[in-house]
Image (cartoon, rainbow, N blue to C red):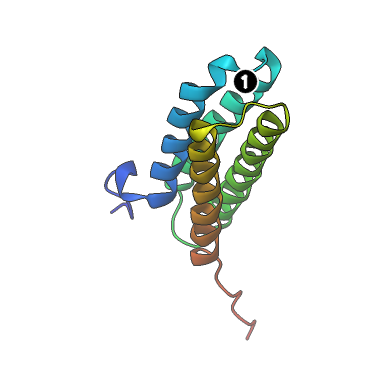
Amino acid sequence: MYEFMSLDRCAAYVAARSALIAVQRVAGGWPDTLAERARREAIETMQVTAEATAYDHATAGRRRCLRDALTSAIGLAASIDVARAMGFGDIELDDVQRTAGRTVALLGMFLHANTAAVPAAR
């Protein structure tokens, strides 16, 4: 039986999906290269988080996916910082930044929950 009967049961996936929706909502006014990079990072975060749920708990495959998702989510947060530095800061950008930060935090907790100690050899 799968650990997650639905992706909606995985808080990190739900956060990643929310970040994608938020980026799609606000990035239209950003320069094309920045907007495209942010969208790509948000999509990658969501897809790789979904892939992680296909692996069993505490497996190397799940941890690899979660590390990759964290990398993408941190890249997304950096893109949002660039948008703010370029003067695109407003209430909506604050919301996107909080959503991206929440995604990073939940992915970190998901990775931590899947980090098992390696059993000692007998």
The quarter of the picture where the N terminus appears is bottom left
The answer to which of 54 and 30 lies nearer the viewer is 30
Find residue 51 and report its horizontal and vertical position in percent.
Answer: 48, 40
Q: Is residue 33 above or below residue 16?
A: above
Mark 1 Cα shell of 10 Å, populated few (<14), some (14-19), many (≥20): many
Q: Is residue 89 above or below residue 118?
A: above
Find residue 57 and report its horizontal and vertical position in percent.
Answer: 44, 60
Find residue 79 and report its horizontal and vertical position in percent.
Answer: 67, 33
What residue type is disc 1 on?
Answer: Ala
The quarter of the picture where the C terminus appears is bottom right
The answer to which of 111 and 32 lies nearer the viewer is 32
Residue drawn at x 64%, y 82% as measured from the top left: 121
Is 104 on the left-hand or right-hand side of 78?
left
Find residue 72 and report its horizontal and vertical position in percent.
Answer: 63, 39
Is 13 on the left-hand or right-hand side of 114?
left
Residue 44 figure quarter: top right
Query: How many labels were placed on the picture?
Result: 1
Residue drawn at x 67%, y 15% as measured from the top left: 31
The answer to which of 106 and 23 lies nearer the viewer is 23
Q: Which residue is mark 1?
A: 35
Residue drawn at x 51%, y 45% as measured from the top left: 98
**Callout 1: SS:** helix
Residue drawn at x 57%, y 46% as measured from the top left: 65
